[in-house]
Amino acid sequence: DIQMTQSPSSLSASVGDRVTITCRASQSISSYLNWYQQKPGKAPKLLIYAASSLQSGVPSRFSGSGSGTDFTLTISSLQPEDFATYYCQQSYSTPPLWTFGPGTKVDIK
Amino acid sequence: EVQLVESGGGLVKPGGSLRLSCAASGFTFSSYSMNWVRQAPGKGLEWVSSISSSSSYIYYADSVKGRFTISRDNAKNSLYLQMNSLRAEDTAVYYCARGGGEQRKKLDYWGQGTLVTVSS
């Protein structure tokens, strides 16, 4: 199975900060990497798919990059509504034994 | 508007069974693969099972294989998860999620989740 790791596990940031979260796969997954945002008590929300494609309706301050084993989610200017936990997920496996990273919690400094 | 609404969660004893449902609306249900993803209290997300649009392909995480059965009824726009031989570690919020995109490789819509608690 493909294992996913994320760093950091948590971070504190201020409104307006540029935030970067890293995700690493245990083997090459090409660009089959998605990013989700989850707020407490709510369902996850898809932000980025195929490593760098912005899901419809998601603000342009969110961006993704990477391929192979190393990926990055960047929030260019953190907004109050962005404080949440972020998960990466690989969709490379066939059959789809998909796996999520452990999450990165972004909170207010 | 795409909507996914789960139901069927609750408190069940270890070894018991439960059937979850997910009612879909706002899209052509029969054209999409569907998934169940769970989240234990205070923990991360775990993919549980996937079913293709016509039920031809079905997959499970090792943690539930042989105990859980995914199914769908395209005429009723509904997804199901039959959970048998439940264990304490199955306690979680269960989400249904649509497999979107051309290759159905992104979970683009999620339900609000239903809580399953396995405890004596």
Image (cartoon, rainbow, N blue to C red):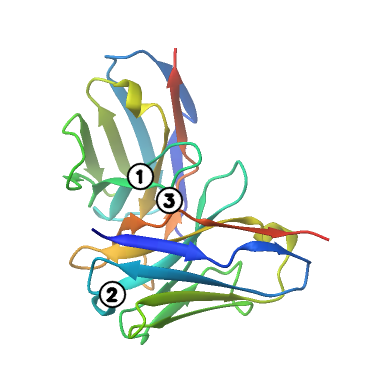
Q: Please name the residue shown 42% across and 31% down the image.
A: A84
Residue at mark 2: B29
Of marks 3 and 1, which one's residue comes earlier in the chain? 3
Label 3 sits on a secondary structure element that is: loop
Q: Is residue A34 above or below residue B29?
A: above
Distance in Å between CA atoms under marks 3 and 2: 34 Å
Q: Is residue A7 above or below residue B2?
A: above
Distance in Å between CA atoms under marks 3 and 1: 19 Å
Q: Please name the residue shown 28% across and 75% down the image.
A: B29
Q: How packed is label 1: few (under 14 Cα within 10 Å), some, or many (20 or more)?
A: many
The kind of residue on which mark 3 rests is: Ser
Quarter of the rendering containing residue B89: bottom right
Quarter of the rendering containing residue A11: top left
One can see residue B44 in this view: yes
The kind of residue on which mark 2 rests is: Phe
Question: Do labels 3 and 1 touch, CB within 8 Å?
Answer: no
Q: Is residue B21 above or below residue A60?
A: below
Quarter in which the C terminus of chain A is drawn? top left
Mark 3 vs mark 2, foreground winner is: 2
The extreme right residue here reads B120
Determine the chain carrying the residue at label 3: A
Residue at mark 1: A36
The kind of residue on which mark 1 rests is: Tyr
Coordinates of residue B84 in the picture (x, y in percent): 67, 77
Left or right relative to B118: residue A93 = left
